[in-house]
Image: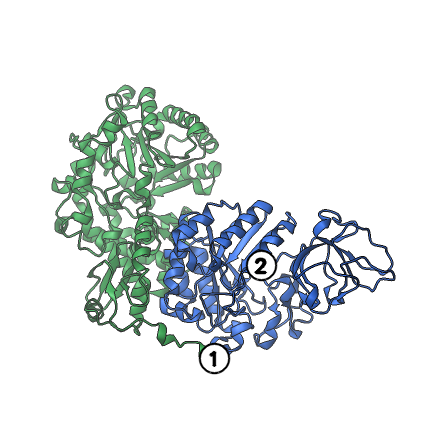
Amino acid sequence: MASVFKEEDQFEPVTGSYKLLPFRFSRLDDKRYVAVNECGEHQVLRPLDLETFVRGKLSPHVEHYTLLKAKHFLSDSSSQIGPDLLTLKVRTKRDRIANFTSLHMFVVTLRCNHSCLYCQVSRQSEDRIAFDMTEEMADRALDFTFKSPSPAIKIEFQGGESLLNFPLIRHIVLAAETRNLTEKRDLAFVIATNLSPVTDEILEFCREHNIYLSTSLDGPEDLHNGNRPNPTRDSYAVTIEGINRARAILGEDKISALMTTTKASLPRITEIVDEYVKQGFHGIFLRNLSPYGFAIKTRYYGQYDSEEWLSFYRKGLDYIIELNKQGIRFSEYYTALILRKMLTPYGTGFVNLQSPAGVGIAGIIFNYNGEVYPSDEARMKAEMGDKVFCMGHLLKNTYEDIMLSPALLTPLEESIPESAPMCEECAFLPYCGADPDYHYATQGDFLGHKALSGFCKKNMGVFRYIIRKLADDPDARRILESWVAW
Amino acid sequence: MLSLSSNGIAALANVTEEGSVVRRLAEAGAGAGWRPDCEYLVIRDNESIPPTGFRGYFYFARPSHQPPSNSFLLDSSLNYLQAGDVVRLTPSRNALRTLYRKNSPHNFFLMTERCNHYCLMCSQPPKPNDDSYLVDEILNIIPLIDPATRSIGLTGGEPTIVGQRFIDVCQSLKTFLPSTAVHVLSNGRTFKDLNFAKSLAELAHPDLMVGIPLYSHLSSRHDYVVQSAGAYDETIRGIINLKSVGVRVEVRVVIHKLTYEGLAALADFLRRNLTFCDQVVLMGLEMTGFTKFNLEKLWIDPKDYQPYLRTAVERLAEAKMPVWIYNHQLCVLDPALIPFSRRSISDWKNEYMPECNGCSRTGECGGFFSSAKRRYSDHITPFTN
């Protein structure tokens, strides 16, 4: 009876029968390469192994043959299904493009009571007429929002200090909910605020309408107060008090915080993380300064370069992983969203890591004055006098005019990474994206020369560091995997 | 273990049934007379005079009166039979086989014994003969089944190898049993033909799932386990096709010496490539059929593969893929895996071993296949508290 069964070697691939499936490779560090395929699966290889593999000489009996085969870097005589699975995975990865715009940002006012050194746009003005969005404009913006085919619509209120125009926020929330009775989208609201104007009445409204709050917390008290001065010199105390009140009324998970890295932050990463842990947050988004708005005018942006920020990021990630090893569940959100690109079949909605660029597609912003911009950064650029990204005006142009305007399409077309010099051959392309705003601000064109690009340097540094952590430290790997949203 | 068939039934009167016939059972006061033209009345005492009008009568005690035509005496091993059950009766061979038990959650129909796999651990070794009468019989059984039945399984052999007739059976299940879940055990290869997958999808059965085995992330290992070159590609294409037309798919993995080491890699493969599958089931080995011949190639004590199983389960659960463990005893499972364990062995072949005496948790334990007597874990220990 046993003889009717065949032995395993009869099913194994013929040595040397494999074909390469599409992938790119780049240097990971002095000793290794990393190969990445179109759907973001990666394999770290020593130079000799990479060369043997590419030359068609890899033996089916070595471990990385089976790893490369399971990740569809090769297709051999025993299986040809790889290209079909790759196709499926690429479609899954890019699924979001078909859904189109989800994030709609409303600049309800430019007025602000803080004068943050890195701030991008706000005005110390009491002039409501000049710098507040009107109800009529908000209604037109809602018309526009519900033209998006996306099944999920997120409305984010921006400023200035958005809560200085709370009556308009209330109007927009109620109007959007009414429309959604028939639209039936997955509708969500977020208010970006420094929390200083927050009252129990506002928080009750947020609770009733399931609104999330997003605030800024730069770190320990002296750092936060230094970065984010307000007239009473107590912005830290105001923020913490606001966070606690918000949590008491809305619940723990309804408020998140963002930090911005200034030169003063650079030596203080562990204190910044500790502050977030102390305040009961479960993660932090380590964010570098952007070259827009007042940050450029005040020369704030140039205070540190990508290399300095990367060193800050690496120290931060190491420290956070260490905290996790001690049993504190805490994640770094930028890493987490890149991990989602690396370790799951799915993409992310993060605007700055999309191809084509996420600006205008993944997110869009309605300025207080009715002008429509593809991103927060683009409207800041406009506040500085350059309206190159202005897609149109809510009162003057149709949805079609605005979404098909050259101010959107040209930056999108010119910045596609798959056809950009250096990007098209970069292993990290499937994790990366186009940032036409950044490259226009720093180099004067939408594509940018990547050898000179701080965006490129920063992200390559982040990708390399994450892949090395995954490859070299099994404990860190388990921790990083636990951060991934599936 | 319940005895599902008997060759010892005895005719007590003249017989008008020809060949093999499918009949439903009735009992006094329990649905009797529903469709008496195809029903047999079960009579458990030897005195009552049976009402007329039934197709026939099954006695468990020799009657004291002259019974009507088509009366049979059944042996006591069949006395679990009750109203609503469906049997195949072959008077010429004194044979009766239970085809459906109303009170069992585990009713499966064997569609064919033919198969295009020859799995090393097959519990139902394939036979090449023409057995198309099996589908004819299933189409006769379905209208007799209680519409309140929770679930029906279709198995084989490879149940889809009969082609359009498989679709016909699914259509009949939908027509007669619209609220009964249907679970198909298939190797998925036939669905490599997108049109076949579509013809199943177009039935729009409200609750149908196809359970498809995948034994490795690597084609050569899967093909070796199922003893068929090219099986891996066709199975995966079948899964993709089914999901692309909206048919629910369960991935099934039997754990043995050839699959346990690859469980984590298989879990990674599933969560990266086939996350859209509806659930994954990781199953213990059944000691029957070909497994007996390949025991040395296949046997590993379940205690010894727990770390591998745990990693696989955790990785699937992390990716939000529903995952279950079938056919495992609680006392050998890693305690972290107990929430994933399901009692899944068909009631008629589910047993416990002598070591289980005094165990306080048999009620929640997966238990053993009755065939497990041949070989089971050295680590069976009763829970006592």
Chain of residue at mark 2 = B
The amino acid type, in three-letter code, at marker 2 is Phe
Q: Which dot marks residue A470?
A: none
- The answer to whether residue B109 is above or below residue A280 is below
Q: Is residue B280 left or right of residue B39?
A: left
| Image spot of residue B77 (x, y percent) | 73, 67
| Image spot of residue A288 (x, y percent) | 24, 46
Task: Decide if residue B108 is in sight here.
Answer: yes
Q: Which dot marks residue A2?
A: 1
Q: Is residue A226 left or right of residue A240?
A: left
Task: Decide if residue A327 is in sight here.
Answer: no
Colour representing chain B:
blue
- The answer to whether residue B56 is above or below residue B260 is above
Q: Nearer the viewer, residue A430 or B167?
A: B167
Marks 1 and 2, Cα distance to the nearest angstrom?
A: 29 Å
Q: Nearer the viewer, residue A245 or A220?
A: A245
Residue at mark 2: B109
- Which chain does green denote in the image? A
Seen at 34% across and 21% down, the residue is A135
| Image spot of residue B260 (x, y percent) | 45, 70
Quadrant of the rendered image containing residue B377: bottom right
Q: Is residue A47 left or right of residue A60?
A: left
Alpha-carbon neighbours of circle 2 within 10 Å: few (<14), some, or many (≥20)? many
